[in-house]
Image (cartoon, coloured by chain):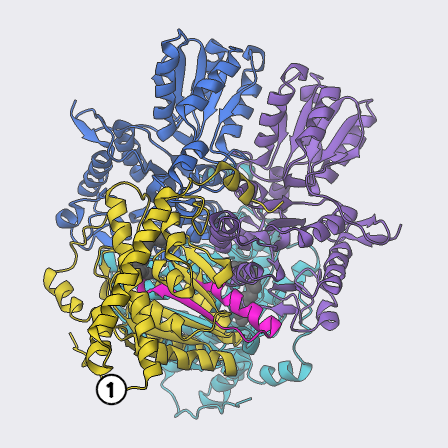
Chain colours: A cyan, B yellow, C blue, D purple
Amino acid sequence: MRRLEREARESPPPAERARLAELYRQMLCIRRMEEAAAKAYAQGKIGGFLHLYIGQEAVAVGAIAALSPDDYVVATYREHGHAYAKGTPARAIMAELYGRSSGISKGLGGSMHLFDAAHNFLGGYGIVGGHVPLASGVAFASKYRGDGRVTLCFFGDGSASQGAFHEGLCLAALWHLPIVFICENNQYSMGTPLYRSLSIEDVSQKALAYGMARDRFDGEDVLRVRERVGEALRRAREDHVPTLIEIKTYRFRGHSMSDPGQYRTKEEIEEWKKRDPVPFARQTLLEHMGMPEAELAALEEACKKEIEEAVQFAEQSPPATEEDMLSSTYEP
Amino acid sequence: MRRLEREARESPPPAERARLAELYRQMLCIRRMEEAAAKAYAQGKIGGFLHLYIGQEAVAVGAIAALSPDDYVVATYREHGHAYAKGTPARAIMAELYGRSSGISKGLGGSMHLFDAAHNFLGGYGIVGGHVPLASGVAFASKYRGDGRVTLCFFGDGSASQGAFHEGLCLAALWHLPIVFICENNQYSMGTPLYRSLSIEDVSQKALAYGMARDRFDGEDVLRVRERVGEALRRAREDHVPTLIEIKTYRFRGHSMSDPGQYRTKEEIEEWKKRDPVPFARQTLLEHMGMPEAELAALEEACKKEIEEAVQFAEQSPPATEEDMLSSTYEP
Amino acid sequence: MPTVSYREALNQAMSEEMARDERVFLMGEEVGHYQGAYKVSQGMLQRFGEKRVIDTPIAEAGFCGVGIGAAMVGLRPIIELMTWNFSLVAADQLINNAAKIRQMSGGQFSLPIVFRGPGGAAHQLASQHSQALESIYAHVPGLRLAIPSTPADAKGLLKTAIRDPNPVIFIEGETLYGLQGEIPEGEHTVPFGVGDIKRPGRDVTIVAWSKMVHVSLQAAAALAAEGIECEIVDPRTLRPLDELLIVESVKRTNRCVVVEEGWPVSGFGAEVAYRVQKAAFDDLDAPVERVTALDVPMPYAKHLEHVVLPSQERVVAAVNKVLYRE
Amino acid sequence: MPTVSYREALNQAMSEEMARDERVFLMGEEVGHYQGAYKVSQGMLQRFGEKRVIDTPIAEAGFCGVGIGAAMVGLRPIIELMTWNFSLVAADQLINNAAKIRQMSGGQFSLPIVFRGPGGAAHQLASQHSQALESIYAHVPGLRLAIPSTPADAKGLLKTAIRDPNPVIFIEGETLYGLQGEIPEGEHTVPFGVGDIKRPGRDVTIVAWSKMVHVSLQAAAALAAEGIECEIVDPRTLRPLDELLIVESVKRTNRCVVVEEGWPVSGFGAEVAYRVQKAAFDDLDAPVERVTALDVPMPYAKHLEHVVLPSQERVVAAVNKVLYRE
Ligand SMILES: Cc1ncc(C[n+]2csc(CCOP(=O)(O)OP(=O)(O)O)c2C)c(N)n1
Ligand SMILES: Cc1ncc(C[n+]2csc(CCOP(=O)(O)OP(=O)(O)O)c2C)c(N)n1
Ligand SMILES: [Mg+2]
Ligand SMILES: [Mg+2]
């Protein structure tokens, strides 16, 4: 496995430190939020499928940090982190997982279907690849209106074999849509390692079939993610050139809560944990950016509080309602 | 438009001449068969959609000439030529177009759905791209059995944007299936020119997404088609390496009988007619291979007879039967 | 009232709505430069330009998905499927995305989108191109389904569909495009969920939609010569369904025949039968009969296609049956 | 008779058929190394090897198509769909290819292929993952459809499906995998088109399949305490359907309730109702009632899922209704 060396950084300007601190905060909150969710799941307070993002946080946080609030995000069922990074409060996410009416999707969507119109988070989708053309459509609307917005579409390595992925990219490339496709290559689709699901090792090669721009890098450094996705966003926004980006990452947990994950060795997981994006960012802040330990501790304490409050909010919220269910199938 | 020069040939061995004569014969018979079909269609004797292959004959004939009889062919709705080249008698094709019980599909399939089990012709399919995974499945069976057979799968340039195309190629590449995919790039999908349907000009580039072998050439010379497809067949048969081949060609008629084809200029069509594969082969035989005009005329007369006989056979055959229809939905 | 074709009526509906609302656009295979595979969008590219009349590659899952995404952020797409047969490659987009996004987002995202195109058999197009798939889409909550039989209904329902904030499956009759009929002048819309009595009659209720209305009208004319008066109820939309109109008619006639072009099993005809026997149990003098396509894939040969499709003769026979004639 | 789980019964069926016939293989997502997403294929990779137990990428249209092609040339594929929800991305392969190839080839190519996997709601999987889609596939001629409710039926029907020369849609109950039940020892097959009376009774006929058999059995037990004896008819296959068994039961009980997990409109329940009212018109003392999922996409929240799905209470209410009780 190729090891990445921490890129040496010159003593950074304070704004840069503040920015990384914020990204670190987001990653940490997502981590704590999902840990809390896993606990609640084990207690039977959350049901259904629960796909944790633990280990991949730098991808969503770094990529979404490069967006402006008007830009759109479309994601999969593994989207707690994306929603949070796009602005959905942890309490609204947690309440959704609990099936409460105060949940971001009123308790009707659950873990896989977080939606947040106010923050231009256009949802988590459960059919692998099925949201890719939809994301192209959101970008199509931006082009149609000339509103200058860009759409970020996230998906896993498993999506790359789906017809909908192909068609979504075909149309984005043909019509020069302002969109960036991010393949979060965590190297497994459920229990299947990449080499048993794809005939190529470099997923970004798929871009060649569409004459699309492409990029490919490792995803443990949230700043690198922000920077490289930022370049693609600029191409999308200014030149109307879509990009397919493959970001290598790893999920530390099973595919979902019900997956014991026996298809990976302990050693492999341990090796990857050395590149955990959350401590990586912390260490950068502490050692390379001179952020005092006390400030870090305060930030971490704030995260803890935020998530505790979110859990409390979820637990105390009233359940999803039949009325919402019945009235939301159709708009009257 | 790039003009192709006739490749100069050394005075060929007699076997080569006989082979080309046979390919010429096949192309000519297909041409005559379709001309007869067009006439019958105009007379209301044939109904439904009728997609003529006129102009593209060298592709099917050349490619299928490189096969052995055990090999399989899967094709689209524009498959009269492929069926004929694979061995289906003109009379059985014509009777099918007439909806007769003596048709190759008993009058139940019609023009778009010729099937011929005896000749390993696995059908014409009407859903663009829908037959591509199926063709991979036929090749899968060959691999499963180790029977050494190869599958040839034909489709149009319009298929390349379909999800099923993508998935079919994904699996073929991943599993090293003995298959050759031939994209007959006639530069239009119905009324849409390639540049408005694909973001790349070189369709064979799609192979890069699968790490698949590829090839690309012009399709008016039936011998070149045979040779280049032959190379791919060898790769498929011996090395289990699938290939995507793009063959540039042109249909002289509309998309189907109901298409006036106003999206192409007369000039464009005339330009392409100069590369008509049928006279091209004839000229090669006559001028470069020393085949006497009298022999050519005899061959042409035989084709004419064959097709006249086929039409007569169709017209005199009894109609498709209700019994066949009812008994063929399920195998009892 | 001006007389126009069903095709022209659809064109008017789209053109009027596009003139009225910048957010409406038309997308599909061959809708622009080719002027529509069935010429429904004739002239629209010239009138509205390439920005709003958009030719697509053959990628139904792709462009149906594109329409869905665009609708989520406020555009109002009209997505043309060249025929509904090809919707099957996009079934996931229609059923798993379009039908569900509003509810699974807790009502945050509405989907004002129309999927339209011809359904049913045309002439000898064989099994993959001759399907009446309305029963499949009518099954799915979250979708609306309109299926007009006349030019006036085609125009009025399509305008309503375009204005509706929900995803609408809009199935046109492939063999009806040339049908001429009167259309009210000026603004003309037909509400969803309101059926129409295409022929009044006292003896038997025939429920039929799309092309089957016309087959039923022929049968009714033939039966009228024998003194049997059929009432033909065209629900016009299957989702929502004007159950009341059907049931009230059956309560008057005490007999019901459903005529549908699709396959029998789990067809919408069964749905109508279920509702009728439930709501008019004591009024029925005979079991509800249905006339459907035979339970086979469509064969190519012309005479067999006629055998498979519901015909005037089979409708007459069904009416006679519920009347216990012969 | 040995007691095994529904899951194990399916595993036995596949393993026995694979041992018996080299042409049979299993293909799908996670069927091999992972031992099956629901562990139905546990141990099969180890037993039969990678050649015959084949993991696929997430490409349902692709591998369903592969199965179809392989079946055309004589193999006998079992294609596992991780759940039937995902079949929608392969709907074109199932409906336009699998169902039609035999007929459109004039009977030249048979398709001995089984598409199997779990259907219906499990627990809080929300709208895209909780669909009972049997009515959609039952609509399509050229397909067979089996949908077992017990371990014995699961084994017997799956063996029949694998041996059947036609494409079979085989829908397992996602919540039934753990269900224990007795299975006849030795060779055990269940023929298609032969229903089974899961509980005899004189007062009301309940038609139910898959998980709804168990919901109905609970309802029947509750009603028995009040002296009402329900007869539960499980058709086991919807295509072909054992109409006779249903109708004869109704002729005895004079009342019929259909219980299905899917959506109401154009559901298979309507089909049963149509056939019953037609074949037993004079025997019915009340309209056929149906109990179905509510007509909405499935919500996530647990209590709402319970509201949407047919429950013992709703079945009891329907039985009371056809009995005019209360
Ligand atoms: C079309 C479809 N097929 C199968 C599934 C079941 N499924 C859910 S997630 C998953 C694996 C996806 O892997 P990947 O795309 O790499 O994303 P990751 O879970 O690794 O984030 C599968 C097979 C599905 N949801 N949709
Ligand atoms: C999925 C699907 N969408 C649309 C169609 C209608 N259609 C039939 S042929 C065709 C054009 C195909 O073009 P191409 O693949 O280039 O093949 P060609 O006709 O040029 O041989 C279209 C759009 C179809 N048959 N299937
Ligand atoms: Mg993955
Ligand atoms: Mg073409």
Residue A135 at x, y percent in the picture: 38, 60
Residue A45 at x, y percent in the picture: 66, 54
Q: What residue is shown at x 50% (from left), y 75% (from top)?
A: B178
In the rendered view, would you say C128 is above or below A94? Answer: above
* Left or right: residue C226 compared with residue C44: right
Q: What residue is shown at x 41% (from left), y 36% (from top)?
A: C305
Q: Quadrant of the N terminus of chain A?
A: bottom right
The disc numbered 1 marks a residue on which chain? Answer: B
- Quarter assignment of residue C158: top left
User: Front-most of C294 and A49?
Assistant: C294
Q: Quadrant of the C terminus of chain A?
A: top left
Q: What is the secondary structure assignment of the residue under circle 1?
A: loop
| Residue pointed to by mark 1 | B9
Structural crowding at the residue carrying mark 1, measured as other residues with C-alpha within 10 Å and reported as few (<14), some (14–19) or many (≥20): few
* Ligand 1 image position (quadrant): bottom right
Q: In the displayed image of the protein, which residue is found farthest to the right?
A: D1
Residue B148 inside the magenta-drawn segment: yes
User: Front-most of D39 and A94?
Assistant: D39
User: Front-most of C25 and D26?
Assistant: D26
- Residue D84 in sight from this viewpoint: yes
* Left or right: residue B215 compared with residue C282: left
In the rendered view, would you say A172 is above or below D280? Answer: below
Tell me the kind of residue under disc 1: Arg
Residue C37 inside the magenta-drawn segment: no
Residue C256 at x, y percent in the picture: 49, 17
In the rendered view, would you say C35 is above or below A303? Answer: above
- Residue A31 in sight from this viewpoint: no
The region drawn magenta spans B132-158
